[in-house]
Image (cartoon, rainbow, N blue to C red):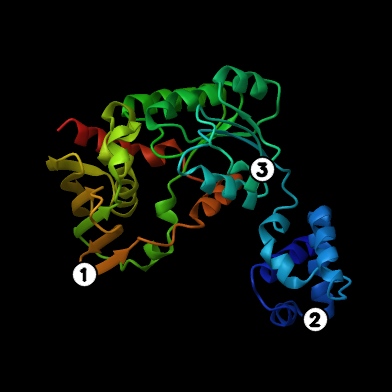
Amino acid sequence: MKTERNKELSSKVLSGARISDTAKEYGISHTTARFIVLRNCKNANPELYSAGIRKGEKNNYLTPPLKYLVKNKHRFLLPAVPMKNFAIIGAAGFVAPRHMQAIKDAGGNLVAAIDPHDSVGILDSFFPDCKFFTEFERFDRYCNKSTIDYAVVLSPNYLHEPHTRWALRNGMDVICEKPIALTERNVDAVAETEKVTGHKVWCILQSRLHEEIKKIPEHFGKNYVVVNYCAPRGDWFQASWKSNESKSGGLATNLGIHLFDLMVFLFGDMEMVIGINRTMTEISGTLELERAFVKWRISIDKNEKQQRTFLINDHKLDLSNGFTDLHTTAYRAILEGKGFGIEDARQAIRIVERIRCQ
């Protein structure tokens, strides 16, 4: 019981609480509280703690500076949990650095990565010892002889389902970027493989974790929502796999999956999709959910400004910023067994599949 109390005290201080206030809350002296924090940090990560002492010695400190401990809190707060090994599929992609940062912040170790493109120098900033492959056969062989706890699937959308099933069959849990599959039929295939193998698929649905979501006022009856989602993209977009509907699922899937998942999370399952209009750079329509009518628009027009705005009844919600640490938040939840699973992601995939059919 005392050990748990000490860990709780340390977590509060490392998360920014003043030692004096925390000491008073627990009925102990300032010196005792500081000693508890330092001892827990030392037990948690002796190597990092020693590095902090070396920093402190420059200023004649015998212990690591408190600012140093707080700065590295993510590596001190998860000491009791054995380090997890990760492998990334799609390490050269746009979103890969966010996952590398999240793995590092959560106290994990990236041991292997693969991408057909070798522009992965970003690995040096996070895990310079990570083994990198450009051929799946060699990556597969390395993973089979190594202990990999989680495979992180960041490949092009149409490969999410086969890569996820490969990882499950090879004894790994999976962390998959949206969408986990392009069709609901493929979602069923992933769910079946998850059931057979006994391993778990976790979905990155980070929009649900945004702080602004908590500020939406409660409303009874149907809500009226207007969504304007603009993510400007240059001419390169039309030459990439992302513009190929068979590979990306189209704009509604590649970009819209974020907003549709959030709408489902807030307002319930889909009832109807109507009025779809599309061009090469824009798609729009109307979506009826259990508790909302949603008029939405998605654009990649390079002449527009980036924005993610939601008008919910009379409440304006701006999600244009605030996504920096959400992957880290999602990873921590996953490591605690509290992340989002396949069924959480199913409804948004059902919506974008319906949109493609219109």
Q: In this view, does 166 lie above or below 14?
A: above
Left or right position of 264 against 111: left
**Between marks 3 and 1, how big is the CA–CA gap?**
46 Å
Tell me the mark number nearer the camera, choosing from 3 and 2: 3
Dot 1 alpha-carbon crowd within 10 angstroms: few under 14, some 14 to 19, many 20 or more = few
Earlier sequence position, callout 2 versus callout 1: 2
**Between marks 2 and 1, how big is the CA–CA gap?**
48 Å
Earlier sequence position, callout 3 versus callout 2: 2
- Identify the residue at image location x=70%, y=55%: 75
Q: Mark 3 points at which residue?
A: 127
Give coordinates of residue 259: x percent, y percent. 31, 50
Tell me whether circle 3 and circle 1 mark residues in contact (CB < 8 Å): no
Q: In this view, does 149 lie above or below 302?
A: above
Q: Mark 2 points at which residue?
A: 30
Earlier sequence position, callout 3 versus callout 1: 3
Give coordinates of residue 58: x percent, y percent. 84, 71
| Amino acid under disc 3 | Phe
- Identify the residue at image location x=64%, y=44%: 124
**Between marks 3 and 2, how big is the CA–CA gap?**
37 Å
